[in-house]
Image (cartoon, rainbow, N blue to C red):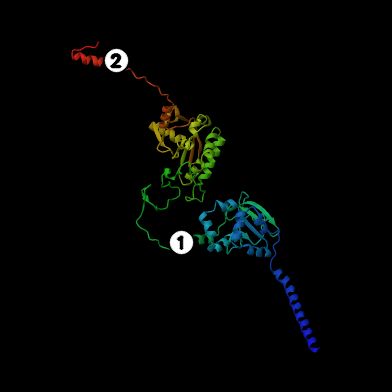
Amino acid sequence: MDSSSIYGVSHIFTFFLLFLLQLCSLSAFPHNSSTTPQINSNSILVALLDSHYTELAELVEKALLLQQLEDAVGNHNITIFAPRNKALERDLDPEFKRFLLEPRNLRSLQTLLMSHILPTRISSRHWPNSDRHHSTLGNHHHLHLATNPSGQMTVDAAEILRADDVVRPDGIIHGIERLIVPRSVQEDFNRRRNLADISAVIPEGAPEIDPRTHRLKKPAPVPAGAPPVLPIYDALAPGPSIAPAPAPGPGGPRHHFNGERQVKDFIHTLLHYGGYNEMADILVNLTSLATEMGRLVSEGYVLTVLAPNDEAMAKLTTDQLSEPGAPEQIMYYHIIPEYQTEESMYNAVRRFGKVRYDTLRLPHKVLAQESDGSVKFGHGDSSAYLFDPDIYTDGRISVQGIDGVLIPPEEEEERTQRTTPLVKVAAKPRRGKLMEMACSMLGAFGQGCQ
């Protein structure tokens, strides 16, 4: 009986110890949870992930910064300067973006993003009038906040496009025009690129000559603004059946021409000028020449477009436009790979009489001559006068309006031969001639014809 009572007491004592341990764990749980900040649905971080700044939100997730930002929001308010999506999609150098997304450069990406966040709340009402610097969550990086004389708020060299765009109790988001790159991240990028160049010595043979240009395949760097090395015909797309690549923006290989924007400007100028809607429609919709022209201008080439007006384009027949590649060939004959204005062309024809300009349609050239105080292009019936001078001139693209559609003289002759009706010529009877010759021969032998 004593043993049974002792056995029961031992069970009760064990149960009591387990109960005390459970109470201790429950009492310790609220203490631990209080040290970890809780993020509610009204947080600025949740608003950032759900906002229209999708490119920035994606970079924050790839940089594994959510936990660090949650800790920061739990301690104080924050101010986020969010670049617009276009600044991260198109305006950012592709090589630099590739560098940021490499796993080994995670620290640089984190520094870049944390340099856009201030550990305090600054709204547009409390924006400083003079230049003041604020510390960021990035390592030893400061942002300079100021207001221009025109009243435009700026952060470093970026303008504030959408002030107080997203407002929450624990923070605020301002939309800025471009990405802010700290000096340390830029140095990491340059150092990584230099190390990649000298990390290994690749054996090289004799220099190779490019058969197209008769130059070395690795020429010296071309300075900004210099004309392209290759002729424009080598830079053209293979043909109208293969669409060219999109025109690069300011971050392209030459870094100083935005051909896509310039082509859009001259297309809009044609539409607003009036009378050249057909030409604009062919360049944009019927062909891919607008994209191809933008690519050429981005590579440093210059162009002069002889644009026929709507009245001239209406004279084109269906047969001329129905053949495969016909619209492209017609337009190529109206594009001169030089930058010419109305004044320069008129001075040339006044001085030399007749001038032949190269076109993008090899090997055809367009003839220009002076006529009635203006410039006349083409030959015979397919000639056209310079009707609207200098519709668009920006130093890279020149558009001159003409009152006719130009056709190469060789094609004009072929079309004339095809349209000329064939006339059958009846053969003259030759029997009389043969009889006369036979009689003369018989007369020589003393015999006559009866």
Q: Nearer the viewer, residue 446 or 166?
A: 446
Q: Amino acid at mark 2?
A: Gly
Tell me the residue at 51%/38% (across/down). 392
Image x and y of residue 394, in percent: 50, 41
Location of residue 349 with respect to 243 vertically, above or below: above
Q: In the image, is 206 to the left or to the right of 284?
A: left
Single out the residue that lies furthest toward the top: 450
How many numbered badges does the structure rendering display?
2
Does residue 327 lie above or below 27 as drawn? above
Residue 388 coordinates in the image, percent (x, y): 50, 32
Q: Is residue 97 above or below residue 240?
A: below
- Give the SS element for disc 2: helix
Which numbered disc covers residue 146?
none
- Of callouts 2 and 1, the N-terminal one: 1
Residue that extends furthest to the left in the rendered view of this protein: 445
Q: Is residue 340 visible?
A: no
| Residue 348 occupies quadrant | top left
Residue pictured at 38% horizontal, 61% vertical: 203
Gap in angstroms between the C-alphas marked 2 and 1? 96 Å
Please name the residue that numbered disc 2 is placed on.
Answer: 432
Do the numbered discs 2 and 1 sit on residues whose CB atoms are within 8 Å? no
384 or 355: which is nearer to us? 384
Q: Looking at the image, can residue 164 be seen?
A: yes
Q: What kind of residue is marked 1?
A: Ala
Question: Quick one: label 2, few (<14), some, or many (20+) residues within 10 Å?
Answer: few
Q: Which residue lies under the disc numbered 1? A: 196
